[in-house]
Amino acid sequence: MSYEYTDEQKAILQKLDEFVQSQPSQKQASQIIGMSDATISQLRKGTYVGNVDKKLKELADYFEVKDKAKLTYTEVEYADTSISSQIYDIISVCQIKGGLAVAAGDAGIGKTKAARKFIADNPSNSFLITINPCLTNVKSLLRTIADRIGAVQEKSVNELWFSIVRKLSDGTVLIFDEAQHLTVKTIEVLRSFSDYFNDRGQTLGICFIGNIETVSRIGGKKAEFAQIANRTKQKKTYRNTDIQRDDIKKLFPILDNENMNAEIDFLLQIARTPQALRGAINLFSNAYDNENYTYAGLVAMAKFMGLQA
């Protein structure tokens, strides 16, 4: 027997249906919401035997938060800034030529966004893996790569390595964000994938993206990094002081007119501090939501946030 929903509950389920349809699958939609796929399926069919009111309240709360978020400032998904465009090109060359490449710089300058944009433009032959301190040994790193590219999760390290190699193909690029967390041994393992393809007259690009330490370690004088540095075909470092005025105009198109020069210049000053572009975006977002992104509004919000230009 199916459950008889009230009009209010039907409205919630309508939002649920629309959300599910906007996602690749109901399973992925359920993971985003934080509710089991089976529960969502049963709620949509009216066959859920648990506490229906409680589950629908959870859904209502979720959609209420999302509706409120739509009323706040929406950040530009990707802006072709001077730094992000260069990092995008480094990844592209790494894919074409194979081997190792490093693009590093201060936090919040657009490195990750450039990588995500490249992945979006090249979904069939590029993969982005974000490193964290938990992935400090070879097996955990290989398992993460295998999961990302859809390779079989073999038990031993050597079988896992070959499983990944068999899944990868000529002309692919693997991008490792937050690469400063990688150890010498894990970097050597990644280099071995590129060498494997190179020995067969093929290309596999391995691009490391991270903070300044990423370049200093890989390009340093320590003996254990010598071979890695010699195999690195590209190595570039970017600072927040490299951010250009046109970058601000691209990030905040609403300010791109002759009457908003003071606002653009102020955001540029913020962007060239350790807060970088991320800090400028957070500042503008808060000022926008406060309904005052004039120069005076930005200055007032900066003081409230404890930012100094």
Image (cartoon, rainbow, N blue to C red):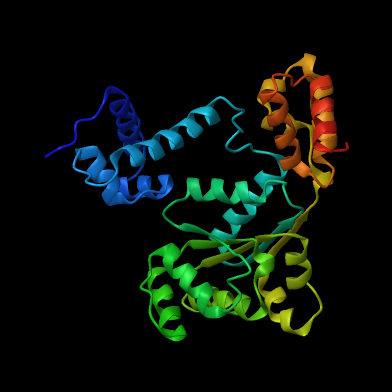
Q: Is residue 186 left or right of residue 307?
A: left
Which residue reaches farthest top? 259
Task: Tell me residue 257's x, y (percent).
Answer: 73, 17
Q: Which of 257/88 is in front?
A: 257
Q: Is residue 201 left or right of residue 9?
A: right
Q: Which of 54/288 is in front?
A: 54
Image quarter (top left, top right, bottom left or bottom right) of the C terminus: top right
Which residue reaches farthest left? 1
Q: Taking 215 as reference, is 263 above or below it? A: above
Is residue 198 among what the camera can see?
no
Q: Taking 153 as reference, is 211 above or below it? A: above
Task: Tell me residue 78's x, y (percent).
Answer: 59, 38
Image quarter (top left, top right, bottom left or bottom right) of the N terminus: top left
Q: Which of 287/162 is in front?
A: 287
Task: Tell me residue 163's x, y (percent).
Answer: 39, 76
Q: Which of 60/23 is in front?
A: 60
Q: Is residue 23 left or right of residue 217?
A: left
Task: Tell me residue 35's x, y (percent).
Answer: 37, 48
Image point (72%, 21%), residue name: 255
Q: Taking 145 as reference, is 85 above or below it? A: above
- The image quadrant that residue 79 belongs to is top right
Is residue 103 among what the camera can see?
yes
Image point (68%, 30%), residue name: 285
Image point (47%, 62%), residue name: 171
- The image quadrant that residue 208 belongs to is bottom right
Image point (54%, 77%), residue name: 195
